[in-house]
Image (spheres, rainbow, N blue to C red):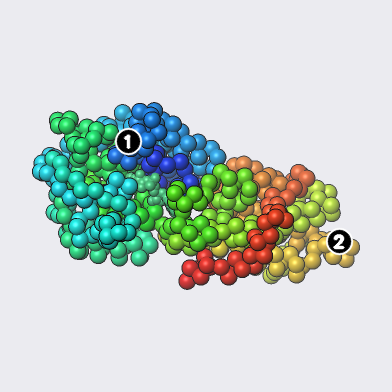
Amino acid sequence: ETRENVPQSYYLTTPIYYVNDVPHIGHAYTTLACDVLARFKRLDGFDVMFLTGTDEHGQKVAKSAEAAGKSPKDFCDEVSQKFRDLPNKMNFTNDDFVRTTEPRHYAACQEIWNRLVDEGFIYLDGYAGWYSVRDEAFYGEDELVEGEGGTRIAPSGAPVEWVEEPSYFFRLSQMEHRLLEHYEKNPDAILPESRRNEVLSFIRSGLRDLSVSRTSFNWGVPVPNDPDHIMYVWLDALTNYLTAVGYPDNENELYQRYWPADLHMVGKDIVRFHAVYWPAFLMAAGLAPPKRVFAHGWWTNEGGKISKSLGNIIDPLQLIDEYGLDQVRYFLMREVPFGRDGDFSKAAIVHRVNGDLANDFGNLAQRSLSIIAKNCGGEMPSPGPFIEDDTRLLRKVDGVLGDMRARFDRQEFHLGIAAIWDAVSDANSYFAAQEPWALKKTDPERMATVLYVTAEAIRGLAILAQPVMPDSCGRMLDQLGVAADARGFTALGESGRMASGTPLPKPEGVFPRHIVAEDNLSVGVDEKAAVSGKNEKNAG
Ligand code: ME8
C-alpha cells in the first residue's frame, strides 16, 4: 500500500447564509465559486467534501421572523428551503447542507464552548457598548463613523445601538501573538494579499476581548450551565464548519479525513470573523485552524450597490432563465478577476455568451462536428500521420491542466478559465488555417487528420471546462462519443485519445447565441463597450 493510492482530501466551505433574506446573486456567486473548485478537485482525483448551509440564529433573523409574523423556527424552515433549493437549480454539488437549528449543531457549539471554558478562555463580565444587528457585530467607539444627521454608524454603513447586558467574554487579547505567528508561518492562509494585509494590520492594532454571549433575547444556542445566556451568533455560526465533520466526535471518519478545512470561501465583508475570530477560537480550544480563508469581492448592479431597499437585487434564477445556466456560471467566474469587486451589466453577459461561448467554443465544435457528420460517415475519422501543426495544438491543450491547477490552487478562477480560452483560440486558428472543408477532394487523408485533431482538442477543452459548465461540456463530450468514465483529468492527452470509427450522434449546437430583444437595443449598442468595460480594467 503506497501513499499515492490514498486520494488527497480537500474540504471547502461557503459561508452559511442568513435566512433574513432570500438567495441573490451574491450568495449564488460564493457557492458557485466553491462548486467550480469542488468539481475541479474531484476531476483531478481529490477526495472532496463541499459544505454550505444556513445561519438561522441571532437578533437579525429573530427580527425578520417577527416582522413576517412567524415563529423563528417556521420562518427559518421556510427561507432555508430557498437556499436548499439553490443547488438543484444551479447544479451545485455540495456534499452536505448544515442548518444551525439542527441538534447536531447544538452539540458541536456546546462542546467548543466547554473546551474554551476548560482552557481558561471564557470569563463572565458585562458588555456595555455598540452593537450592529445588521452586521451581528460589536464595535468599539473608535471604529464608528459619522452617518447622516450626525448619527453613529458602523464602518459597513450599518446602524448601531447601545447595548448593556451581562455577557461572557472570550480572551481574544491573549491570541494576538499566536495569530500573528500563524499567519507569518502560513503566508497563503489569507488570500488575496490585500485581505491578508487588512487582517494583519487589524491584529497588530491590538485585539480586545470579545463578547460571546447575549442575554437580551433567546434565539440561539444556550450556553452550557447558564441558560440565561445564548451564544453569540458568530461563534455559533462559525462552528458549523466543525458540525459537518461530526465534531465533537473527533474519532469519526469525516473529522479524521477533512479537518482542518482546506478553504473557507467568504465575501470580503466577513473576513475578520473568519480570519481573526475563527482561528482564535479554534487554537484556543486546541483545534487546528483552517488552511486558508479566501475573501472575494463585491458585486454591484450596473454600477450601483445591490440592496433590498434599492430594489435592484439580481435574482440568479431569473438570470438563468434569460441566459442559460452554464452561461451564467461561465460569466460569473470569467468576467471579474476573482477577489476583486465586479459590476454586473447585461452588456457584459451578452458579450461573454455570444463571444466566448457561441462564437469561439460553440462554433468550433458545431462546425467541425458537422463536417465530420457530412464527410466521414458520422464516425470519428481515422487520422494519417501528424505534422508539426497538429502536435503543436494538442500539446497546447495538454498544457492547460498545469496552468489551471496553478491558478485554481490560488482561487484565480478567471485566469484558469482564460488558459482554456487561450487554447480555444489556438484551436480556432488551427481550424481556419488548415481549411479541412477544402481538403475533401484534394487530400481526404489530411482532411481526416485535421478533423480528428480538432475533435481531440475539443475533447480536451470540454473536459477541462466541465467544472465551470458541467451540462454543456457533458453534451459536447456526448457528441464526441466520449464515455462517461473517461471524462476525468486522467483521460486528458494521449491516455484518452479517441478511437477512430466510433459512431457519433448527430451534432447539435451547445452554446446558442443570445438574441437581444429589439426593445432592449441599448444592450446591443453597449455590447462593444463591454469589451473594454470596467471589469477588464480590474484585471491588472
Ligand atoms: O454574513 N457580492 O451571511 P449573509 C458578492 N451568516 N458576494 C455577496 C454579495 C455581493 N453583493 N452579497 C452577499 C453572513 N454575498 C453570515 C455568514 S459564516 C459562518 C456566517 C455573499 O447571508 C458573500 O459571500 O449576509 C458574503 O460574505 C455572504 O454572501 C454574506 O452572506
94, 437: nearer the viewer: 94
- Rate crowding at label 2 as few (under 14), some (14 to 19) or many (20 or more) other CA atoms within 10 Å: some
On screen, residue 195 versus residue 487, left or right, reads: left
Could one spot residue 238 in this view of the protein? yes
In the rendered image, the vertical position of residue 218 relative to residue 454, given as above or below: above
Query: Does residue 257 appear anywhere in the picture?
Result: no
Label 2 sits on what residue type?
Answer: Lys
Foreground of the two, 493 or 57: 57
Image quarter in which the N terminus is found = top left
Gap between marks 2 and 1 measured at Cα: 71 Å
Q: Position of residue 155 (x, y in %)?
A: 30, 58
In the rendered view, does 304 fall on the left or right side of 505?
left
Q: Is mark 2 within 8 Å of ligand 1?
A: no
Q: Is residue 483 left or right of residue 270?
A: right
* Quadrant in which residue 440 is drawn: bottom right
Q: Look at 65% across and 53% down and name the residue there.
A: 459
Q: Residue at x 39, y 39 (%)?
A: 19
Q: Amino acid at mark 1?
A: Ala
Residue holding disc 1: 62
What's the mark number on residue 440?
2
Label count reads 2
Pick out the residue farthest to the right. Answer: 441
For the point 48% across and 68% down, the residue is: 538
Q: Is residue 430 left or right of residue 314?
A: right
CB under 8 Å between callouts 2 and 1? Answer: no
What element does badge 1 sit on? helix
Q: Nearer the viewer, residue 388 or 303?
A: 303
**Image position, residue 486 (x, y; %):** 60, 45
